[in-house]
Image (spheres, rainbow, N blue to C red):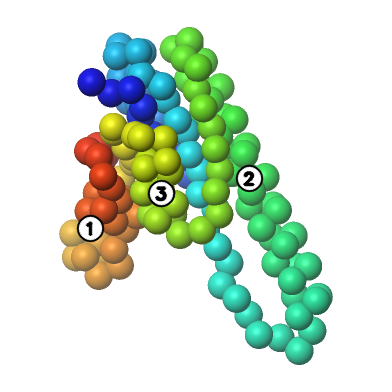
Amino acid sequence: MYNNILVPVDGSEKSALAALHGAELASKTGSKLFLFHVVPSLPPYIDTAPDRLSKVQQSIMDQLIEQGNIILSKVNDDLAAYGLNIHTDIAVGNPAEQIIKKAKEINCELVIMGSRGLGEIKGILMGSVSNKVTKHAGCPVMIVR
């Protein structure tokens, strides 16, 4: 039923729980498990010294990507007991858009992701990554609370 399962991870407890659900399901169904981390893009800034600013922004992005790789590695290690061949990837951009893009790219049949637990009103006002993915993904989305 599920050949490819995508689990976006962000270092939160909810995403770690989603990864455990993904590993459990993948181990029972023989699915491939994809762990995916998205580093949000930094907003562009206007400065009189753009070269200096671009170096600072690049340094920040490098650190965020390094942190993302650490998150992926930790979750991968936490799932080692399942004996799965886990694929990991990282992208930079809008998290919801990148998750939807990745799901399509790997022909994903299921996305499993954590809920941040926003209150209903706050979630409506702010929106959320899981809400956007649920609405726009071309496959079922499981939200783990």
Task: Identify the residue under disc 2.
Answer: 67
In the figure, is residue 95 to the left or right of 88?
A: left
Badge 1: residue crowd in 10 Å (few <14, some 14–19, many ≥20) = few
Residue 131 visible in the current orientation: yes
Residues marked 2 and 3 touching at CB (< 8 Å): no
- Few, some or many C-alpha atoms within 10 Å of disc 3 (few <14, some 14-19, many ≥20)? some
Picture quadrant where residue 142 is located: top left
Tell me the crowding category of disc 2: few under 14, some 14 to 19, or many 20 or more residues within 10 angstroms, Cα based.
Answer: some
Amino acid, disc 1: Gly
At 34% across and 34% down in the image, what residue appears? 108
Disc 2 is placed on an element classified as helix
Judged from the image, the secondary structure of the residue bearing numbered disc 3 is helix
Please name the amino acid that badge 2 sits on: Gln
Specify the label residue 132 is tagged with: none
The N terminus sits in image quarter:
top left
For marks 1 and 3, the one nearer the N-term is: 3
Residue ID at (23%, 58%): 119
What is the three-letter code of the residue carrying label 3? Lys
Q: Which residue is mark 3?
A: 101
The structure residue drawn at horizontal position 21% and vertical position 65%, both measured from the top left corner, is 124
For label 1, the residue is 119
Quadrant in the picture for the C terminus: top left
Task: Tell me: 135 left or right of 99.
Answer: left
Secondary structure type for disc 1: loop
Residue 114 falls in image quadrant: top left
Mark 2 or 3, nearer chain start: 2
The CA distance from mark 2 to mark 3 is 22 Å
Q: Examine the rendered structure and indicate whether residue 12 appears above or below residue 57.
A: above
Compare residues 19 and 97 and report the one nearer the observer.
Answer: 97
On screen, residue 13 above or below 122: above
In the figure, 65 relative to 70: above or below?
below
